[in-house]
């Protein structure tokens, strides 16, 4: 039987589901949706906090991908453009 629980050693970025591409950006497209880090769900915040580098394709749980389903720019330690892959 499948379970939706995760072990303490399993981060949201390692669970099956979808993938997102995260790129650091200096510009924000005029029609982009901009969200601040603290507006994101806890799991999405954890994925972003674990990033290393200016560009990454990250496997994520479906609920994280759904939160950034549209092209979105997140204000964190800089501006990050996030798209679902």
Image (spheres, rainbow, N blue to C red):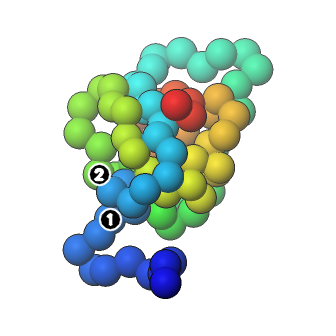
Furthest residue toward front: 1
Residue 66 in picture, x, y percent from top left: 65, 49
Q: Residue 47 carries which label?
A: none
The residue at the point 52 percent across, 31 percent down is: 85
Name the residue that disc number 1 marks.
11
- Name which quarter of the figure residue 21 lies in: top left
The residue at the point 38 percent across, 77 percent down is: 6
Q: Distance between the residues labelled 1 and 2?
A: 9 Å
Q: In this view, does 30 lie to the left or right of 76?
A: right
Q: In this view, does 73 lie above or below 62?
A: above
Crowd around label 2: few <14 · some 14–19 · many ≥20 (10 Å): few
**Label 1 with label 2: CB-CB less than 8 Å:** yes
Furthest residue toward right: 31
Name the residue that disc number 2 marks.
50
Total labels drawn? 2
Q: In this view, does 45 lie to the left or right of 69?
A: left
Say whether disc 1 or disc 2 marks the residue closer to the N-terminus. Answer: 1
Q: Is residue 83 above or below residue 45?
A: above
Residue 84 in picture, x, y percent from top left: 56, 34
Q: Is mark 2 on a helix, strand or loop?
A: loop
Q: Nearer the viewer, mark 1 or mark 2?
A: 1
- Name which quarter of the figure residue 56 lies in: top left
Front residue of 46 and 74: 46
Q: Is residue 69 left or right of residue 3?
A: right
Residue 74 visible in the shown view = yes
Residue 77 in picture, x, y percent from top left: 38, 40
The residue at the point 43 percent across, 56 percent down is: 16
Q: Is mark 1 on a helix, strand or loop?
A: loop
- Name which quarter of the figure residue 13 lies in: bottom left
């Amino acid at each position: 039987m499948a379970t939706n629980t995760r072990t303490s050693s399993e981060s949201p970025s390692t669970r099956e589901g979808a993938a997102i591409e995260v790129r650091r950006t200096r510009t924000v497209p005029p029609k982009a949706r901009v969200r601040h880090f603290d507006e994101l769900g806890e799991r999405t915040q954890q994925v972003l906090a674990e990033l290393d580098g200016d560009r990454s394709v990250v496997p994520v749980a479906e609920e994280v991908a759904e939160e950034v389903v549209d092209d979105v720019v997140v204000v964190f330690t800089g501006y990050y453009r996030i798209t679902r892959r």
